[in-house]
Image (tube, rainbow, N blue to C red):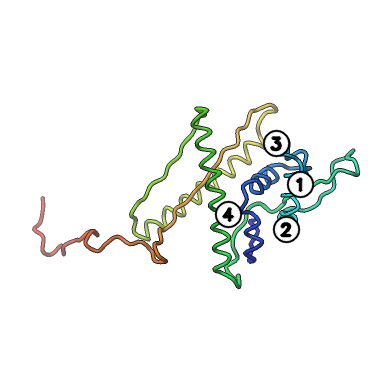
Amino acid sequence: MPRRVADPAVMRALAHPLRLAILAEMWDTDRPLRATDLAEILGEPANSISYHIRRLRDAGYVLDSSGPEGATARDHWYVSPQRGITGDDDATDADGLREAFGAVLRTRYSQVAEHVIDAQAAQEKPLVHVDDMIWLPQDLARTYVRRLADLADEMRRAAAAARTSAQPGTPFTRYTVTVDLVPQVRRGERLELPVERTPVRADRDDQPDAF
């Protein structure tokens, strides 16, 4: 279950690409990790990883953990057990929280764009990237929101089942998935189709019968 965050400063702690990358790796593993492990995975200096882990720990996203059997006392191990974040609707500084969450989203979507570009350059398949702007009535939009959410849940369940049942040595690839159907807002107001461009249906009583 995602962690609910009410403090803008705590949310803003994630508005750094390396911190989001650290959390993604920690969420994806089923064991504690050291800064040196993450440095090797991410190709970043260990001292930089250590610094950002401390900032994540200060914000409560990362916890100290005991190491595996045989670990030395000088090693520091970390876990991030609560996957995902969301804003708390009861936050006292709602405007500050929205601004901080926006900073995190901009960082995240920049990373997603890089994933798409890198996969396209490497000609990796299967790859699909779809974005569009679609005018929908709200009842139809709600229908697709539910269907998209159900599809995301189905993919998560299928991924978990595949990891449980796969034969040893089965290659797995990590895929980036984003699912968004968001009403556009301009200057604080929902962007609506102009009245003159909306469908007009004449009263059926005024139309001749058709055979």
Badge 1 crowding class, 10 Å Cα cut-off, few under 14, some 14 to 19, many 20 or more, is: some
**Helix, strand or loop at disc 2?**
loop
**Helix, strand or loop at disc 4?**
helix
Residue at screen point 90% across, 40% down = 72
Q: Nearer the viewer, residue 90 or 75?
A: 75
Q: From the image, state whether disc 3 or disc 1 is nearer to you.
A: 1
Residue at screen point 69% across, 35% down = 43
- Mark 4 and mark 3 lie on one chain; the one further toward the N terminus is 3
- Mark 2 and mark 3 lie on one chain; the one further toward the N terminus is 3
Give how far across and how far down residue 10 sits, in percent: 66, 61
- Mark 2 and mark 1 lie on one chain; the one further toward the N terminus is 1
- The residue identified by callout 3 is 41
**Looking at this rendering, what residue extends furthest in the bottom direction?**
92
Instruction: Identify the disc placed on residue 104.
Output: 4
Marks 4 and 2: CB-CB under 8 Å? no
Q: Amino acid at mark 2?
A: Gly
- The residue identified by callout 2 is 60
Which quarter of the rendering shows the N terminus?
A: bottom right
Q: From the image, state whether disc 2 or disc 1 is nearer to you.
A: 1
- The residue identified by callout 1 is 50
- Mark 3 and mark 1 lie on one chain; the one further toward the N terminus is 3
Mark 2 to mark 1 CA distance (whole Å)? 15 Å
- Mark 4 and mark 1 lie on one chain; the one further toward the N terminus is 1
Please indicate whether residue 71 sits to the left or right of residue 25 in the image.
right
Mark 2 to mark 3 CA distance (whole Å)? 22 Å
Q: From the image, state whether disc 4 or disc 2 is nearer to you.
A: 4
Q: Amino acid at mark 3?
A: Ile
Q: Amino acid at mark 4?
A: Val
